[in-house]
Every structure is written in structure tokens, then in C-alpha cells.
Image (cartoon, rainbow, N blue to C red):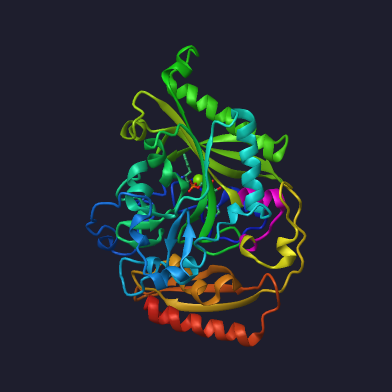
Amino acid sequence: MRPLIRSACRLRARVRAMATLPAAAAFSPSSSAAARPPRIPLARFFLPSAPPPAALGARALRTSAAAAAAAVEVGGVKIAREDVVREEDPTNNVPDTIYSKIGLQLHRRDNHPLGILKNTIYDYFDKNFSGQFNKFDDLCPLVSVKQNFDDVLVPADHISRSYNDTYYVDVQTVLRCHTSAHQAELLRDGHTHFLVTGDVYRRDSIDSTHYPVFHQMEGFRVFSPDDWSGSGMDGTAYAAADLKKTLEGLAKHLFGAVEMRWVDTYFPFTNPSFELEIYFQDDWLEVLGCGVTEQEILKSNGRTDHVAWAFGLGLERLAMVLFDIPDIRLFWSNDQRFTSQFSEGKLGVKFKPFSKFPPCYKDMSFWINEEFTENNLCEVVRGIAGDLVEEVKLIDNFTNKKGLTSHCYRIAYRSMERSLTDEEINDMQWNVREEVKNKLKVELR
Ligand code: FA5
Ligand code: MG
């Protein structure tokens, strides 16, 4: 399985890690339901759904005057806590820690590494395509299941649709797990060249390169028969060649002269599909997924007889390398010692760590049950410790004669900004144990 997204293992070198993670989630090849079946009963994932909302994120946004005061605004849409977090609703799995990230839009801050990177990519497209690409960086992250999955042909039983992998507001509304969620509507609106940057949300494991909210940029370009008719190629070959040329140029623009390679892969929405890897600090780093758009997507959205390419790149992954940022949590830091190191237009200024506080490790063992998943455990830990949790790692695993399976997890607590006291760590660990017992219904050992 060639992957990307998720790692259970600690990464010796950051770049090595990012290039080789055995991903489970999302759209990587064979991360299919067969490869990793959801543990939560399927009935919970596929409740009969009402018709999807007509407009972008429409369902969430009827708020009372009082709630509106506390709401955040994204793309002119107000989102209040109760629009997104509903503890009593079994079809909702969005915690407060996730709600608190909505509307922060790190990619829209010109002095933030993600904003600096976004603007540098914009410069490349402006320069090479004389302003043809329309840019969107303020689309609401609340989208329908249809937008996030159906419109881009994600199969009904694909693992990425599970409650274990995606944040559901209700059966028909999710926090987008990729910026591809906007392809279809933008095509229908008549766009043929576009870039969509946004925060995306995935339930995931915890370590230095994985965070449940990260940022992607989607690129999309449509060709009409006139574009390829004189080329001697068919439309698909023409688009694939243009895609590779465009992205190789982007990689050079960001990294300078670099060694890179293409790897064949699978996405439900493109065929052929590729990943681009860059040789960096002694290893291959996957920086994006892309491919030639499936005809069905073009046909369904008003572009019969056209072809298109699309790509989706992870801004944190690129920024960690370009700026030497060692831990993905740092992107969310408001600490002056972090934020003051970056300024508009300055790509690739190397981050100087202001301190390294020691981690504190706590182990916990329990007998798992059928429903247990690591993503659920990580959510509980993150709910209590927030960004003070650096890693949650399975360190022991066995099944006894009675068929009971025991897991031992090691939790690393570490602040990026200060020393933690024994007392607060012990308190957090005690709360984690209580919640793991009560919420996950496992038997602590
Ligand atoms: C996708 O999300 C596809 N929508 C990309 C795509 C778009 C393919 C258009 C074809 C056409 P994937 O799940 O592999 O694919 O994520 C794309 C990129 O996001 C990865 O290459 C990586 O750079 C980044 N990424 C994925 N998961 C994480 C994560 N947990 N943390 C940080 N970055 C991530
Ligand atoms: Mg991938």
C-alpha cells in the first residue's frame, strides 16, 4: 500500500517520515474498506439521508441572534458552535477542539508560513498562466456528503466515508476532508482554471506530522478539444503531460533545482493518477496527489467532451520542509517566538526552535472491545490534553487465551511553549483514563 497519511510509527527523520507513512485514510491506493474495515457498525455510517443541501454549507447556518454573536464567519457564512457540535446527536462526531479551529484560516495570514506558501504558489500560477486561474480561499468547510464524496465518485463503501475517518455534523453534512469537495460546484459555475485553498478535517492518529485539521490547495484546469487537437496526442495524454509539466515547474519554483519522481497511484476521481515525490534531505517526500479527471465528473458538471487535470497538495507538508518546522502543532501557535520568525513574501526562512521542553510519557493498558479504534482514542486524548499531546503510540498488543486483546498506548505530553508540571500531567492522565473507560467502554488494566 502506498500511502501518505497516517503513521503509527515514530519518525526518525521528518522528511523520511513524510515520504513513507503507511497511510490509511483518505484517498490513497487500496486504503479501501476491504483493506481496513470500519469498526463502527456500518449502519451508523449509512443512515438514509435526506436530499443534500442546495447551497454550500447551507444547513448549518441558521443561527439565533444570540448564537450568531459567538459565531465565526467563513466566506460570509456564520457558523455557531451548536451548528457543528451536538453531543447528544449520535450522527454527530465533531468535538469542541475541532470547532475551535473553524474560521482561523491560517492560510489567509500573509505572515504565517502557510499564507506565505500559498502566496508563493499563487505567484507561480499568475506568472505562468497570466492570471487565468481563479483563486478561492474562503469557501465554507461545511459541505454536504454529496460534495465531499459523491460528486468526486468516492465509492459508497470507501473507508474515508466512515465516522472513524471523517467529521460528520449530521448524516448529510461533513467538515470537508479534502478540497476536492469543491470541484463539481466550481465546474458547474463555469470555472475552467481554479485554485482552492482551505482547511480540511480528518479524524486521525497523533504524531508530529499529523493533525486533525490541515490545509490543502486544489488545482483544476479544463481543456477543450481545440487545445489538444493539433498535438498528436489524445485528450487524456495531453492533459497528463501538461499536468506533469505544470507541477514540475511548481516544485522548481518552491524548492529550486530538485530531484523529483512520479509515482503511479489511485484516486477515485482521477485516471491516470500520480503522486509527485521530491528528493529532499536524503529521502523521497510525497508532496501531492493528482491526475486526469474522470470523464464522469466533467460530464455531470457541464463539460462533456472536455478533459481536465486536478491536483491536491498538503500545505503543512511542504511548509515543514521549506521552513524547517519540526512539529505540525506549531502552525497553530500564537507564541510570539514562533509567529515573529515569519514575514510576508519570505519563503524558506529556516525556523529556529526557541526551546525544546522535555516530553513526559504516560502508558495506559486496556482490553479493547469490537468498536475500539485508535482514532477514537486519539480524539479522547486530544479532547482533554489539546495541543499538549505530542504523540499517541501503540507500544504493546497481545491477545490472551480467552481471546481478549490488550493494547498498551504510550502518550507523550509536551508543550511547545513551556515546561509542564507533574501535577498537570497527572491530572490530564487521570482524566484521560476516566474518559477512555467511560466513552470507549474499554476495561482498563
Ligand atoms: C487527497 O486528498 C486528494 N483529494 C488529492 C487529489 C486532488 C488527487 C485532485 C487527485 C486530484 P490525499 O489524501 O493523499 O489526497 O492528500 C493530499 C495531500 O494532502 C498529501 O499528498 C499530503 O501532502 C497532504 N496530507 C494528507 N493527509 C495529511 C495529514 N494527515 N497531515 C498533513 N498533510 C496531509
Ligand atoms: Mg496521497
Q: Above or below — where is 93 with respect to 209?
A: below
| Residue 292, image x, y percentages | 45, 31
Of residues 84 and 93, the one drawn nearer to the viewer in this rendering: 84
Residue found farthest to the front: 65
Q: In which quarter of the image is residue 14?
A: bottom right
What residue do we see at 51% from left, 78% from top? 364
> Do we see residue 163 in this rendering?
no
| Residue 3, image x, y percentages | 50, 48
146 relative position to 233: left or right: left
Of residues 201 and 406, the one drawn nearer to the viewer in this rendering: 201
Question: Start and end of the magenta stretch?
Answer: 317-330
What residue do we see at 32% from left, 64% from top? 40
What is the count of numbered marks? Answer: 0
Q: Is residue 320 magenta?
A: yes
Q: Does the magenta stretch include residue 386?
A: no
> Do we see residue 307 in this rendering?
yes
